[in-house]
Structure formats: C-alpha cells, structure tokens
Image: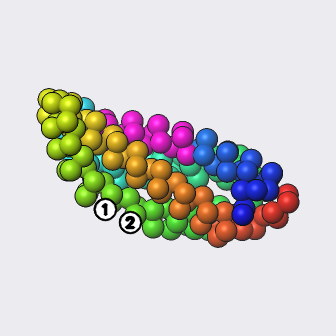
Amino acid sequence: MILKQGKERKRFIKFAFVGAIGAVIDFGVMNILSHWVWQLPLVAAGTISFLCAVISNFTWNRYWTYPESRSRPLLSQLGMFFLVNAAGVLIRIPILHYAEPPLLVFVENTFHAAHLTAEFIAKNFTLAAAVGIVMMWNFFINRYWTYNDIDDES
C-alpha cells in the first residue's frame, strides 16, 4: 500500500494538514454564509466554501506537500487539481443534501435541542462527514494523477 512508504506517509500527513487548513476555511466560510451573513442554504454555502478551500489547498500542496511536482505548468496542474475537486463536489453535494435533514431531526429529537442549535450541529456534522470522505478521494486521485510527475522515492 502507498502509505507504507515513509515518503508517502509524510506526504499524506502534509496533505492532511493542508486539508485541515482547508477545512477551517471551509467551515468558516460555510458558517458565515449559512448562519451569520446571508443564511444561504447548506448546498450553496458549502459549495462556495469548498471552492475557497480548494484554492488554499492547491497553493499549499503545490508549494509544500509536493514541491518537486512543479514540472507541470501552474495552470495545467491547477486544472487537474480542480477537476479532482470538482468530482469531490459531486461526492459532497449528495452527502450535504441527504444527510443533513435526518441528522437535524435526530439532534432535535434525541437532545431536545432548539431548532437553531440543532440546525447548527447538523450542518457542521454533515459537513465534517463530507470533508472526511472527500479528503480520501482527493489524496489518492491527486497523488496518482495531478502529482504523478514526482518519483515515489523523491
């Protein structure tokens, strides 16, 4: 398996750290857009927040996680990274759309939480699940496609 190699394990840790930064951006923008500024629906706010995180993640991954991968032109690699993440959006949107409503009901009924509190919890837990699933997709596809120009042992 790829993560048994020391260099790949180190790359995965860096990728996960970059993803954590992206998640902070993702959660922050989603909460600002869906709770505090415009009260956008979760799918709209989550899509915008995802795009903000993608820009951050691409920059950090290109220059820190995979600095040896810059043999490709910037726009070409950004296009590849974006396509992988666009597929991630296709994974993410159904999770956000279908998982939040039953989770909201569960939180309201189980914890007898006020609707706004339950909604906040449900949106954030739904987004956390989507982020975790999409992160695994992103790492493996980006490693073998977007950043396949680096040597496994480099």
Q: Where does the image place residue 22, in percent across and percent down from the top left?
A: 51, 43
> Which residue is label 1 attached to?
94
Label 1 sits on what residue type? Pro
Q: Residue at x 75, y 68 (%)?
A: 149
Q: CA distance from mark 2 to mark 1?
A: 7 Å
Left or right: where 124 falls relative to 6 = left
Taking 97 as reference, is 52 above or below it? above
Pointer 2 with pointer 1, Cβ within 8 A: yes
Q: Residue at coordinates 20% horizontally, 31% vertically from top-left?
A: 111
Name the residue located 72 percent from the left edge and 56 percent from the top edge. 3
Q: Which residue is mark 2?
A: 90
Name the chief secondary structure element in magenta.
helix
Highlighted range, magenta = 19-33
Q: Quadrant of residue 71?
A: bottom right
| Callout 2 amino acid | Leu
Q: Is residue 92 visible?
A: yes
